[in-house]
Image: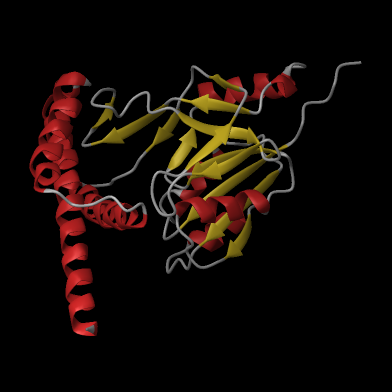
């Protein structure tokens, strides 16, 4: 008699994702347990998630890493698939996950890594560092854990992993304004993370890091192959790095003035 495939939980974090949450949940019909951590949405995110069969947990925003940890802790099953609300399993990835769960050698692995394919500026972005953008998202929660920065660069760490061939699909921005807002927000978080890690500002970083980021994104990683959208993305990435170090300088200036005022 064949072994029964283990059940999996789908873990999602969300804030005002009414436009995306149903697509995300419906893309994983094999999940028998769905957890959505909602960090105070003012739209219909929670209501739509409940209609799709999710258990919605209201919790204040803890940062990406700790909110995803919380979502994992709320899951009923040991095998967890973690998705952001603006992501979905492609049909090919769903078939691959279904096959993996039925594999008798499943427990030889602690986690599985997906390529992530993002839609931006009217096309699937396949260059410039946007693809394959490997993401460890299917994992055994007792043998893997969320690590990384407190607010940025969160990731699942596991020892025995395997790369898959089919992608998670991702719709990060509806329009360019959202991408600009995200660059602004992430540069703030990046500057704060530099302070936490005791990374100091320097003029060299402010001047040369953005240039090297543009060259990396547009030339080395082939962003030019994505046409004008690839150029726009490369400039945006460089500007985000510039903002991070400019904001780090600003934070250090405020800290210095604060120390002077205390004397």
Front residue (pair 153, 44) = 153
Residue 240 appears in view: yes
Q: Is residue 228 left or right of residue 150?
A: left
Write down the quadrant of residue 162 in the picture.
top right
Quadrant assignment, res 37: bottom right
Q: Residue at x 17, y 29 (%)?
A: 230
Q: Position of residue 125 (x, y in %)?
A: 27, 28
Furthest toward the front, the residue is 263
Q: Quadrant of residue 8?
A: top right
Residue 249 on image: x %, y %: 16, 58
Q: How is the image coloured?
A: secondary structure
- Measuring 22% from the left and 21% from the top, which residue is drawn there? 221
| Up-down relation of residue 64 to residue 26 (above or below) | below
Q: Give the residue at x 56% y 41%.
A: 82
**x%, y% of residue 34?**
64, 48
* Residue 177 shows up from this direction: no
Residue found farthest to the right: 1
122 or 261: nearer the viewer: 261
Q: Nearer the viewer, residue 119 or 245?
A: 245
| Residue nearer the viewer, 66 or 16 | 66
Q: Which residue is at a point 32% across and 53% down the rendered structure image? A: 198
- Where residue 138 appears, x then y in whole percent? 59, 33
Quarter of the C terminus within the rendering: bottom left
């Amino acid at each position: 008699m064949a072994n029964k495939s283990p059940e999996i939980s789908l873990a999602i974090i969300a804030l005002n994702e009414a436009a995306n949450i149903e697509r995300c949940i419906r893309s994983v019909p094999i999940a028998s347990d769905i957890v959505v951590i909602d960090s105070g949405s003012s739209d219909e995110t929670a209501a739509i998630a409940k209609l799709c069969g999710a258990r919605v947990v209201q919790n204040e925003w803890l940062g990406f890493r700790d909110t995803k940890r919380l979502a994992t802790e709320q899951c009923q099953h040991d095998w967890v698939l973690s998705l952001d609300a603006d992501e979905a399993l492609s049909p090919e990835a769903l078939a691959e996950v279904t096959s993996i769960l039925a594999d008798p050698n499943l427990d030889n692995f602690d986690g599985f890594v997906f390529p992530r394919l993002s839609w931006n500026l009217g096309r699937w972005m396949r260059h410039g560092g946007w693809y394959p953008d490997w993401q460890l998202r299917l994992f055994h929660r007792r043998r893997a854990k969320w690590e990384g920065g407190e607010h940025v660069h969160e990731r699942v760490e596991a020892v025995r992993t395997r790369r898959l061939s089919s992608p998670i699909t991702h719709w990060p921005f509806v329009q360019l304004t959202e991408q600009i807002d995200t660059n602004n927000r992430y540069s703030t978080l990046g500057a704060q993370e530099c302070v936490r890690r005791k990374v100091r500002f320097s003029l060299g970083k402010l001047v040369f890091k953005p240039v090297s980021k543009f060259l990396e994104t547009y030339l080395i990683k082939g962003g030019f192959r994505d046409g004008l959208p690839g150029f726009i993305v490369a400039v945006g990435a460089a500007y985000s790095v510039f903002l991070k170090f400019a904001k780090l300088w600003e934070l250090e200036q405020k800290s210095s003035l604060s120390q002077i005022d205390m004397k």
